Image (spheres, rainbow, N blue to C red):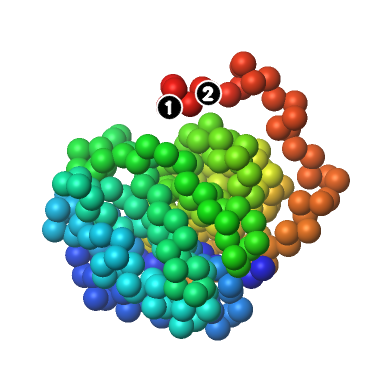
Amino acid sequence: MRAAVIQMASIPGDKAANFRLAESLLRQAAAGGARMAVLPELWPTGFDIARAAAYGETLQAETGAFLRRLAKELALEIGGGSFIQAKQGKYYNTSMAVTADGQLAAAYSKAHLFSYDMDEDQYLSAGDQWVAYDSPAAALPVAMMICYDLRFPEFARNLALRGSRLFTVPACWPGKRIEEYRLFCRSRAAENRCFLLSANQCGAFGGHSLIASPFGEILAEGGEENQAVLADLDFTLFADPRLFGSFHDRRKRLDEIDDSLL
């Protein structure tokens, strides 16, 4: 399956401009043969979380309608990056997965909020569950993560243990820590023997969106400009004897975390 990660520099607060740019890049991905494309974190508004109350919308509102329309028109499964979701008086950093027939397959709210120097936890509420869905395009289970989740290997491992074979990871990862981003993307892919598609914002953020193989190889990587980055995912790798998995050697008492401790 050919997949794409959409790298773009969102303009804070200018949803119209951001929608136009996202549509242009999604059309490039589809024209290049992609059957799945992933957008970056908070692409509709930029990382302007202090104005979450002004941007908050439901899954059925503007961003969701935009993704459903383009997915159906382009016959493209879209990992819809993330947007500010308003739900029951709270605001979440939420990602939507939309199938090529324009249907919402899954929605995931970011579980780990970045408190260090962006105060994400001061403005948004954290999600409290793993989310994966059966992808029609890939014909395998796809797990959803967002940006800072990459720093929590147990989170990705639990998704892989539950059958996921491909991770989608929209991000707003800063340039000053871009080597850590590249390392974490490759590590989460290799240690879980999964493909990984991560779309990072550029401009104010670090770019270098990438697609990684289950061996931790970078199959394709962006630079620092707006672009659609494409690569072919060879799912026959899952039958490759070199792709030994460590799951059967794990020590459950030592290596896993009980659900009640999340």
Q: Give the camera-side residue of 179 and 262.
A: 262
Q: Quadrant of residue 135?
A: bottom right
* Above or below for 60 versus 72: above
Instruction: Report the disc number at residue 13.
Output: none
Residue 158, image x, y percentages: 56, 35
Residue at x-position 60% and y-position 53%:
141
Residue 27, image x, y percentages: 47, 81
Q: Give the camera-side residue of 62 and 187.
A: 62
* Above or below for 215 versus 260: below
Residue 65, image x, y percentages: 32, 72
Which residue is label 2 attached to?
A: 257
Task: Specify few, some or many for label 2: CA neighbours under 10 Å numbering under 14, 14-19, or 20 or more.
Answer: few
Residue 233, image x, y percentages: 68, 63
Which residue is label 1 attached to?
A: 262
Residue at x-position 19% and y-position 65%:
13
* Above or below for 48 versus 248: below
Q: Give the camera-side residue of 176 and 205.
A: 205
Find the distance from the CA under tag 2 to the CA under tag 1.
8 Å
- Kind of element beneath mark 2: loop
Three-letter residue code for mark 2 = Ile
- Kind of element beneath mark 1: loop
Q: Are marks 2 and 1 in contact (CB under 8 Å)?
A: yes
In the rendered view, does 116 fall on the left or right side of 7? left
Three-letter residue code for mark 1 = Leu
In the rendered view, does 164 fall on the left or right side of 247? left
The answer to whether residue 200 shows anywhere in this view is: no
In the rendered view, does 205 fall on the left or right side of 241? left
Residue at x-position 26% and y-position 70%:
62
